[in-house]
Every structure is written in structure tokens, then in C-alpha cells.
Amino acid sequence: MKTKIENFLKYQIEFSQKEIRATWVLFFISIGIIILPIIYKNTFNDPATITSIPIHVIAENHKINENQLNINHFYQSNKKHHDVPSSKLSIDINTTDTNNLKKINGIGSVLSSRIIKYREALGGIHSLDQLDEVYGLKDPALSELKNHINTNNLNVFRQININNITFKELLHHPYFDYNDVKCIFEYRRKNLFSSYEQINEILPHLNKKLVAPYITF
């Protein structure tokens, strides 16, 4: 390849040997001008790279402001400290408030408020799988939340007496829609419920595992 280029310069353009050498020098300088800024950018603009190289080395060799690097290090270390909750953090989902939930990475004011409102609408949470039902709560925040909460306190769990509850009250429960409530009240006109199996007979689409803990007779 090199020989072909030199022959072209020598016989087609009639360059002297000195001019050919000068052309090669200019070629490699041009390549260096193009490549070096890319290498520099990828190496020293990456926060992970900066934090792994001693500050005085970067500042001395590349004339980067050392004060600015100190700020970057402070920001990175504080970000990790505040964003990642302690592995010992364990929150009872049935007694907690929004302030505690916001200590979990990925849970802000909006999601913490939705979680509390959904818990209150249900009457309490008995399974971590129920958190999948909270609107807008998705991974990785959802997984992070499940890692740091528990359902140990069920003393505050609010159950429904299916034989006494009003139509309006039952309609407000997230697991029952209008048609579900209508079926239950039509059944109640003739018989009282004594077991969940009776509910399952008229409303087989309901998830027994999720719904049954809320029902009492």
C-alpha cells in the first residue's frame, strides 16, 4: 500500500523523494490531530475514569483545574452515599409514611404518595407482589423498594365484612369493580356468605390469593 502511494506521488504527481517524505509526515500529523482529541475525550470526560486517577496526576499532566476535580470527587462520593440506602434499611409498608419511603433509591414524592394511597385504598398490604399494582412503579425502583420493605405488622390490616359492607364502600376497594359488587349484593339478597368459596363461585376471575385476606364473614 505504501509503495503504491509513493509510486503515485513520484510518477503521477512528480514529487521528489523529499516531498514524498514530507507528505507522509503531514499524513501522520493529520491522523494524530483527529484521533488524540477523541482518546482524550473518552478517557478524561468519563467520571468513572476521573475518579480512578489520582488528582495530582491528571492536573499536572493535562492541566485540569485541581479544584474542579475535587468538586467532582466530592459529588461522586456524596451521590453514592445518598442514593444507595443502607442494607439494614427495613420499612414496614403498613405503618410507614412518605418520608421513610423516599429514603429508598428511586422513590420520590410522587411514587411514595401513590404507594401510601394505594395501601389505604386496599386496607393494608399483605404481599410484596401487590406493589406491582401501584401505577407508575416499575423496575429498578420497584425491585429496590421490595428489597427494603416488609409486611410484618398486620395488626393495622383492615378487613371487609362481606355481609355488612355497603355497596359504595365495597365499590371503593381496588379489587372490586361495579359488576363484581353488583353480583355480591345480588347473592346477598338470598344468602349470606360464610366462606370465600361462595365468592369464588360467583366471581371466579378474582385472584383468591390477593383478595381472600381482606374478606371476613
Image (spheres, grey):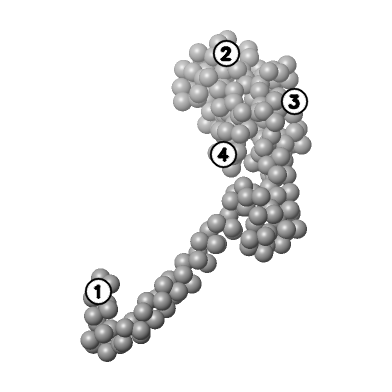
Q: Is residue 19 visible?
A: yes
How far apart in space, not on screen, are marks 4 and 2 (Cα)? 41 Å
On residue 140, the disc is: 4
Q: Quadrant of the C terminus?
A: top right
SS category of the residue bearing label 1: helix
Q: Are marks 1 and 4 in contact (CB under 8 Å)?
A: no
Between residue 215 and residue 52, name the one nearer to us: 52
Q: Residue at x 59, y 51 (%)?
A: 49
Q: Are marks 3 and 4 in contact (CB under 8 Å)?
A: no
Residue ID for mark 2:
193
Tell me where residue 204 appears, x and y as whole percent. 46, 22
Of 149 and 170, which appears nearest the observer?
149
- SS at mark 3 in the image: loop
User: Mark 2 belongs to which amino acid?
Assistant: Phe
Of the two numbered discs 4 and 2 on the same chain, state the one appearing first in sequence: 4
- Graded by Cα atoms within 10 Å as few (under 14), some (14 to 19) or many (20 or more), the crowding at tag 4 reads few
Q: According to the image, label 1 marks what residue?
A: 3
Report the mark closest to the observer, 4 or 2: 4
Alpha carbon distance from label 1 to label 2: 96 Å
**Mark before the other along the chain sequence, 1 or 3:** 1
